[in-house]
Amino acid sequence: ILRKDGDYAGMVWTINATGEWFGDRFEPYFYQNGVWNLQQTSNVVVDTTAGVAFPLIGNIVGSAELLVEYDAGTAFDVASVDQTYQFRLGYTW
């Protein structure tokens, strides 16, 4: 059964935090975005990423992170929490 999307009043928040460990060798980070339905207060969606970036060789950097997606409004037969582990490579200049 498909539900029609509707408009609702909501509250949105964003948190972005980074730091440094051991000088600039390791950079932990935490990002979170959330939407809270104020008309149906039990309905909230939150996406959270926590990880650490670190230098590898030269200007190549790596990172390991955990992404957790939470949706309180999912259908009864769908999981409300989804976790993803990611390992990434990047380049800085």
Image (cartoon, rainbow, N blue to C red):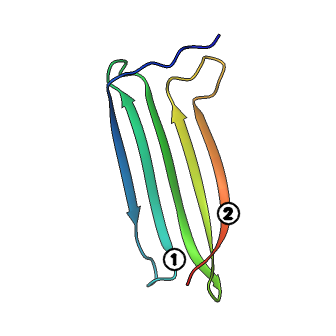
Question: Which residue is under mark 1?
Answer: 26
Q: Earlier in the sequence, mark 2 or mark 1?
A: 1
Q: Quadrant of the N terminus?
A: top right
x then y, percent, for residue 89 = 67, 71
x then y, percent, for residue 50 = 51, 57
**Residue type for callout 2:** Phe
- Quadrant in which residue 90 is drawn: bottom right
Please say if the residues under marks 2 and 1 sit with CB atoms less than 8 Å apart.
Answer: no
x then y, percent, for residue 41 = 35, 22
Question: Which residue is under mark 2?
Answer: 87
Q: Residues within 10 Å of mark 2 (few under 14, many from 20)?
A: few
Q: Residue at x 66, y 53 (%)?
A: 85
Q: Residues within 10 Å of mark 1 (few under 14, many from 20)?
A: some
SS for tag 1?
A: loop
41 shown above or below 92:
above
Residue at the extreme bottom = 58
**Residue type for callout 1:** Phe
Q: Quadrant of the C terminus?
A: bottom right
Residue 13 relative to residue 58: left or right: left
Query: As rendered, which of 35 and 18 lies closer to the eye?
Result: 35
